[in-house]
Image (cartoon, rainbow, N blue to C red):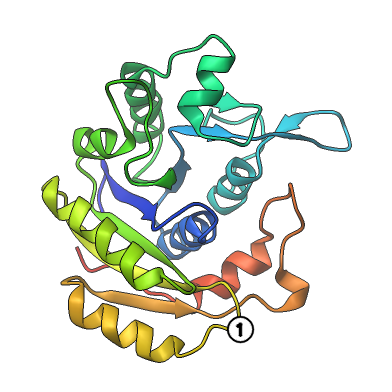
Amino acid sequence: MSKSTGLFVTGTDTEVGKTLVSGALILKLREQGINAIGFKPVVAGTYQDAQGHTLNEDLETLRIASKLSSKELSLCPYVLDRPAAPHLVAAHQGLKLEMSVILQGFQNIQNQADCVVVEGAGGLIVPLNDQEDLAMFAQEIKLPIILVVGMKLGCINHALLTYEAIKSRHLNTAGWVANTLSTEMPLIDENIQTLQAKIDAPFLGLIPALPQGLQKADNSPYSIEALNFAAKHIQLPNN
């Protein structure tokens, strides 16, 4: 991938593995000598580290994968404190999420990177304000879409609805990743086969459930070991 390129990682829902996949993709790109850096348009939910710094677990994961310290670059223009729908948290704080601010933040990262891996917030059509949503941001930046499917009961419907939404907005699906959320999901291979038959985009791999020693605690980023584990089970898209 050359300068000003990248990927937009969206998911079938919140908590389906977008951050894990985004971090893994960054690692795989960096292994190829590409200066890949993560970006997120908005995050909702923060925690305090041992030094009293206010952090967000998704952003810290992207920093770990991008090999950046917490003082290098702003990977997100809007960091909201409450874990809820971003436009509602912003309104509660007296803010309006502005597309222009998010685009400027993205361009700032783009100027520092060969490739930007953008992780969405929640699903594809999460509102930013009364008029705009994340899908519109994806249309603005024109990056190929990676769809993360959280493998759980109902995932086929969620995945196909999201895929239809991507297509209806004339966005390019570069591929999709299946992320195992529970080892107890019945017929996981058959679910994947159904999605392969119905999604006209490359299947980039199945990430198994993280081994217990690699699972992250609440309000903490993924470790580099967890990202490496995920990276071994997926491939980069060809386009």
Q: Which residue is mark 1?
A: 183
Q: Residues within 10 Å of mark 1 (few under 14, many from 20)?
A: few
Task: Pick the quarter of the image with the N terminus.
Answer: bottom left
Looking at the image, is 49 positioned above or below residue 224? above
Name of the residue lying farthest toward the right? 50
Q: Residue placed at 35% from the left, 63% from the top? A: 158
Residue 34 in view here: yes
Percent position of residue 22, x then y: 46, 56
Percent position of residue 196, x then y: 25, 81
Q: Is residue 202 left or right of residue 127?
A: left
**114 vs 81, nearest the viewer:** 81
Q: Is residue 102 left or right of residue 219?
A: left
Q: Residue placed at 23% from the left, 74% from the top? A: 202
Q: Quadrant of residue 174?
A: bottom left
Q: Quadrant of residue 111?
A: top left
Looking at the image, is 38 positioned above or below residue 86? below
